[in-house]
Image (tube, rainbow, N blue to C red):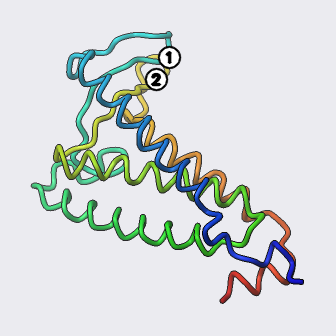
Amino acid sequence: MPNTASISNGLRAWPWYVLAIAVIGLDQYTKALATATLHYGQPLPVWSWFNLTLQHNTGAAFSFLSDAGGWQRYFFTAIAWVVSSVLVVWIYRLPRGHNLLALSLALILGGAIGNVWDRMMLGYVVDFISVHYQNSYFPAFNLADAAISAGAVGMVLDSFRVRSPADEQVIKE
């Protein structure tokens, strides 16, 4: 009988897809709430280091290429769909028992689709979380960005995991 860690998720990947859908739903809900209740560009202080500030990001992470003239909308949308497709297949083919990596990929998948939905429907990504120290502000972000960041951290942590030879064989196939 084969080692269960060497068998791919296959149809058992559905909980990870449900998590990705939950991330998308929560992200879209919070963006709609921020859009409905916040005034664009006007900070709403929550704590001394945290504001809610509605912003529209036409670029990528940290507003990269936000003033590029419009082509970036289609470019970033295409990249997000390609990455999302790869993540769907990766989660499906991932060996069972690689829960940290599956969790990380599901968070990244949900975050990527949450942001690409905004980009396709609105032409920009809704950001509203603003963290700062005194007058130094981190670029505004949203729950999709937070999920992507948490997923990236999870992938780094998973890379330190000791894998068995059977795991490595499945990953290479």
Extreme right residue here? 1
Residue at 75%, 77% in the rendered image: 7
Give, as a three-letter code, the residue at label 1: Trp
Mark 2: give few (<14), some (14-19) or many (20+) Cα within 10 Å.
some
Count of numbered circles on the image: 2
* Quarter holding residue 122: top left
Residue at 69%, 75% in the rendered image: 8
- Tag 1 secondary structure: loop
Determine whether, in the image, residue 14 is placed left or right of residue 143.
right
- Tag 2 secondary structure: strand
- In the picture, the quarter occupied by the N terminus is bottom right
Which mark identifies residue 132? 2
Give, as a three-letter code, the residue at label 2: His
- Residue 108: image x %, image y %? 51, 54
Which mark identifies residue 17? none
Q: Which residue is mark 1?
A: 49
Is 155 or 28 nearer to us in this picture? 28
Extreme left residue here? 69
* Quarter holding residue 27: top left
- Residue 121: image x %, image y %? 18, 47
- Residue 31: image x %, image y %? 33, 31
Mark 1 / mark 2, whichever is N-terminal: 1
Residue at 66%, 53% in the rendered image: 154
- In the picture, the quarter occupied by the C terminus is bottom right
Residues at circles 1 and 2 in contact by the CB criterion of under 8 Å: yes
Q: CA separation, marks 1 and 2?
A: 5 Å
Determine whether, in the image, residue 99 is placed left or right of residue 133.
right
**Vertical comparison of 2 with 27: above or below:** below
Determine whether, in the image, residue 17 is placed left or right of residue 73.
right
* Quarter holding residue 53: top left
- Residue 51: image x %, image y %? 41, 17
Residue at 86%, 78% in the rendered image: 3
